[in-house]
Amino acid sequence: MRDEATFKVKAGLAEMLKGGVIMDVIDQEQARIAEAAGACAVMALERVPSDIRRDGGVARMSDPEMIQSIQEAVTIPVMAKARIGHFAEAQVLEALEVDYIDESEVLTPADEANHIDKWPFKVPFVCGATNLGEALRRIGEGAAMIRSKGEAGTGDIVEAVRHLRTINGEIKRLGGLSEAEIATAAKDHAAPLDLVRAVAASGRLPVVMFCAGGIATPADASLVMQLGAEGVFVGSGIFKSADPEARAAAIVEATTHYQVPERVLRASEGLGAAMDSIESRKLEESELLSNRGW
Amino acid sequence: MAVGVLALQGDFEAHGAVLKRLGAHVREVRVPSDLDQLDGLVLPGGESTTITLGIEREQLAEPLRAFHSSGKPIFGTCAGLIMLDREHLGIIDIRAERNAFGRQVRSFEAPLEMGLDGGPVAAVFIRAPWIAEHGPGVEILAEVEGHGVAAREATVLVVAFHPELSSDDRVHELFLQSVRDARLAAA
């Protein structure tokens, strides 16, 4: 008597990723470097966000062959991205048996009104959020893990900090509300009432929340962990830096020892240059990825 | 009673919450000195490759073996079971097969008979290992489809699933009983 793909099993994998670093990789060599540096999972994609930004055009799900080659190269979990609302891409990723699907704003959205109905899938989903309402809407649709969005491909941490502080601030403010006020809060956040009630009672999201979008240094990882992230995604920050092996291991070390400045210091030494970065505030409205999805 | 939880990566907070609920003092363990004065230790679920590298980086392997040799109980779940096997820390005489049930789509929940009072435990298996081989001193406590998924050897208890993700505290209670017994024996 086995129950596969229960919500507990889907959300449970995210529990196992906690305190870890999930790294974007574009080929087998990068995947092996990420695994050897201590990544707890890899995200297989054809172009890292900074290249998607530079190249423009429509960004789609990666070539299944490329994802498969990465599944063959490593034993840690392999995630892959589908476009927002593109449930057929998600079905392909499920047929590939990736371990997690990221319904991601980094790719060009396929549906401007609807996200994927994630409940029918056996593979769990992670989705981005900029505030509590967005996180709870995704969980309501079946997401088993949340990542604060940040602004992918910039190397600028400011949006990640904004989104984390917003989500955690909104969670804190639910704490003091009466039952009647919780119903109003659900309306204001445009979020399912039962989920808002559960968050008000527990003081946390019902699933694990990582931080993404802009992490480039060990100190960035420590910052977002201290702000309440339960782990980090690093996209362009590793393989667009001068010394990916060293930086990947350093970000892993800083994520484990985020509360110990001496260890973050040691991890930060001798890494060479970080990725080329873009100040998020200088981006045009139309260039922002975090505005995609609702 | 002070119990440590290895906190390099994984679901160490979930273990801490269960242990606190059962009355233990809990300390997160990241460096060798965190092991001082502990009565028992939990190796949590997580990514075994990441935790292996963390143990190397922090030079924790020898201190963990010494902790075991001093007679203090150790409990490993999922990745923790792998860390304790012959090919890793060598603290229990088993060989674990990683991701033995398959990728995440094969992860499952099932009631599991472990011979505990109160009937089967609600077991959550996530990209779980199983016990492929074991030595004569190892007692297999539960099986799924003929493969060992829970075992004990003297003061070491391992399970391939995640009792820390359920509200059923009996497996942790079994471990804490061995911690109490070891304290009495040492006194």
Image (spheres, helix red, strand yellow):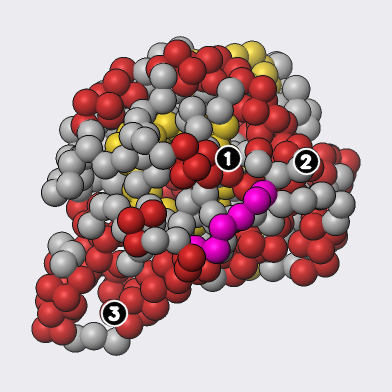
Q: Residue at x 20, y 71 (%)?
A: A189
Q: Residue at x 46, y 44 (%)?
A: A53
Write down the chain letter for disc 1: A
Write down the chain letter for disc 2: A
Residue picked out by circle 2: A243
Mark 1 vs mark 3, foreground winner is 1
Residue picked out by circle 1: A23
Q: Is residue A252 left or right of residue A135?
A: right
For badge 3, the amino acid type reads Leu
Percent coordinates x, y for residue A33 in the rendering? 70, 30
Magenta part of the chain? A275-280
Mark nearer the N terminus (1 vs 3): 1
Q: Is residue B173 visible?
A: no
Tell me where residue A168 sits by quadrant. bottom left
Q: Is residue A20 above or below residue A239?
A: below
1 and 3 marks in contact (CB < 8 Å): no
Give whichever of A155, A93 is nearer the camera.
A155
Give whichever of A89, A260 is nearer the camera.
A89
Q: Residue at x 34, y 24 (%)?
A: A93
Q: Is residue B32 above or below residue A180?
A: above
Residue picked out by circle 3: A174
Q: Residue at x 48, y 51 (%)?
A: A152
Tell me where residue A156 sits by quadrant. bottom right
Q: How far apart are the alpha carbons under marks 2 and 1?
A: 15 Å
* Mark number displayed over residue B10: none
